[in-house]
Image (cartoon, rainbow, N blue to C red):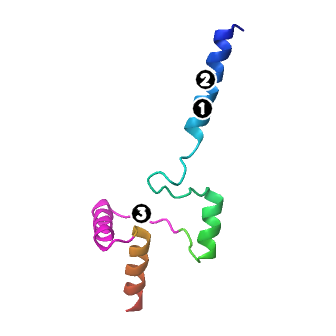
Amino acid sequence: MKKTDLEKNKALKLMGKLKAATPPGRYAGTAPVLDRREQRRLDQAAGLVPFPVKLQQPLIDALRARAAAEGMSINELTNALLASALKE
């Protein structure tokens, strides 16, 4: 290999490492990203169970708007709405 090819390969390897690295927490308040296994373990410890449901788009839009207005996640809002509906 020529010296220029070696340098080009080193630069490509360095750029790949830079793209794969996550930014430090001091930038824009980035939260540490958990891998799926760790997130699943935390969810199970909190008693959360994944429950896929197919809903119509207007209902989803209304849920997103209400969650944004109340400042909570869609999961929290759906949990609260289902709990209040099932109490009756």
Q: Magenta stretch?
A: 51-72
The residue at the point 57 percent across, 36 percent down is 18
Q: Is residue 19 magenta?
A: no
Q: Does the magenta stretch include residue 53?
A: yes
Does 48 sit left or right of 53 as displayed? right
Q: How far apart are marks 2 and 1 (CA)?
A: 9 Å
Residue 82 versus residue 62 in the image, above or below: below
The residue at the point 51 percent across, 58 percent down is 31
Q: How far apart are marks 2 and 3 (CA)?
A: 47 Å
- Dot 2 falls on a residue whose secondary structure is helix
Q: Residue furthest top?
A: 2
Residue 85 lies, in percent from the top left, at 37, 85
Q: Closer to us: mark 2 or mark 1?
A: 2
Residue type at numbered disc 2: Ala
- Dot 3 falls on a residue whose secondary structure is loop
- The residue labelled by disc 1 is 16
The label shown at residue 54 is: 3
- Say few, some or many: other residues with alpha carbon within 10 Å of mark 3 (under 14 / 14 to 19 / 20 or more): few
Q: Residue furthest front?
A: 26
- The residue labelled by disc 2 is 11
Residue 71 lies, in percent from the top left, at 34, 71
Q: Which of 63 and 15 is in front in this view?
A: 15
Quadrant including the N terminus: top right
The residue at the point 32 percent across, 65 percent down is 64
Q: Which residue lies furthest to the right in this view?
A: 1
Residue type at numbered disc 1: Gly
**Mark 2 or mark 3, which has the lower sequence index?**
2
**Mark 2 or mark 1, which has the lower sequence index?**
2
Residue type at numbered disc 3: Lys
Q: Closer to us: mark 3 or mark 1?
A: 1
